Every structure is written in structure tokens, then in C-alpha cells.
Image (cartoon, rainbow, N blue to C red):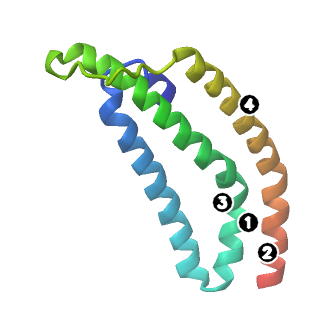
Amino acid sequence: AVFLLSFTAFGVVVIPALMFLKGFVLSLSVSSVLSSLGKRGIITAFSVFGVQSAVSIPCLILLAALAFEISKVFACVLVPQKRRLNGKKPSFIYFLVFFVFCCILLFLTASLDSVLTPKLLSLTLKAIL
């Protein structure tokens, strides 16, 4: 969604909202696990969310920042009073290469997560119960 929104002026508004929503949902999920399991929930939350979040959150934040800059260019074209870009124009090629790199990294992380998370969770639940 962030990649597609980078091509629109509407992305200036929606990209920060999506990042806020991602952070809110993740923190709500972790706090729910922690509140229901207490101190034992720390290890459980890490085993469920830790592997994926260690890579996906930095990738998504960096992609969102680059997409926001590109989307700002489109917004500046539409609003004539705000045509100032301060001489900085983000490189679309750099964004595309970084996007492909992040996609590969997220795919590898998802593969690792699908293998590692069930094992971590079963070890954690055996230790808790």
C-alpha cells in the first residue's frame, strides 16, 4: 500500500496514518499478551512478534519515509502555493531499488518467521505451563 501511495498526492495524508495504525495494532497486540500473561507474557510476546517485527518495522518505516518524500513531490505539483521542495527531489530509482531490497528481505523474514515462530511459541508455552 505504501508503494502505491507514493505515486499519489493523497499519500502525504495516508502514509503517516498507515504507519500510525501499524504501530497502534502491534502495540495493542503486545500489550494484550502482556496484560493477560503478566511477566510470562514478555517471552511469549517476543516469540510471537519479535522475529517478524525486528525486520519488518525498520523496513516499513524506511519505505514509508521514502514514499512520503515522493508523494510530497506530487502534492507540491497539485498545490501551486506549496511548490517549494527546497531543491531536494527524491530519486525514484533509489526508492525502487530499496523497495525491491525490502521486499526480498521481508520475504526471507516471513519464511524464517513461519518456521521459527511455532518452535519458539511451543518452547515458551512449555516453559510457562
Spatial CA distance of label 2 from label 1 is 7 Å
Q: Earlier in the sequence, mark 4 or mark 1?
A: 1
Residue type indicated by callout 1: Ser
Residue type indicated by callout 4: Ile
Determine whether the residue tagged by mark 4 lies in a helix, strand or loop: helix
The answer to whether mark 2 and mark 1 are in CB contact below 8 A is yes
Spatial CA distance of label 2 from label 4 is 29 Å
Identify the residue shown where x is 52% and y is 43%. 61
In terms of image quadrants, where is residue 12?
top left
Determine whether the residue tagged by mark 3 lies in a helix, strand or loop: helix
Q: Which mark is residue 56?
A: none
Residue on which disc 3 sits: 49
Of 106 and 111, which appears nearest the observer? 106
Residue on which disc 4 sits: 104
Of 74 and 40, which appears nearest the observer? 74
Kindly give the residue lying farthest to the left in the view shown: 81
Vertically, is 89 above or below 23?
above
71 left or right, relative to 27? left
Residue on which disc 1 sits: 47
Residue on which disc 2 sits: 124
The answer to whether mark 2 and mark 4 are in CB contact below 8 A is no
**At which x and y percent is residue 119?**
85, 62
Spatial CA distance of label 3 from label 4 is 19 Å
Q: Earlier in the sequence, mark 2 or mark 1?
A: 1
Residue type indicated by callout 3: Phe
Q: Earlier in the sequence, mark 3 or mark 2?
A: 3
**At which x and y percent is residue 129?**
78, 85
How many other residues sit within 10 Å of disc 3, few (<14), some (14-19) or many (≥20)?
some
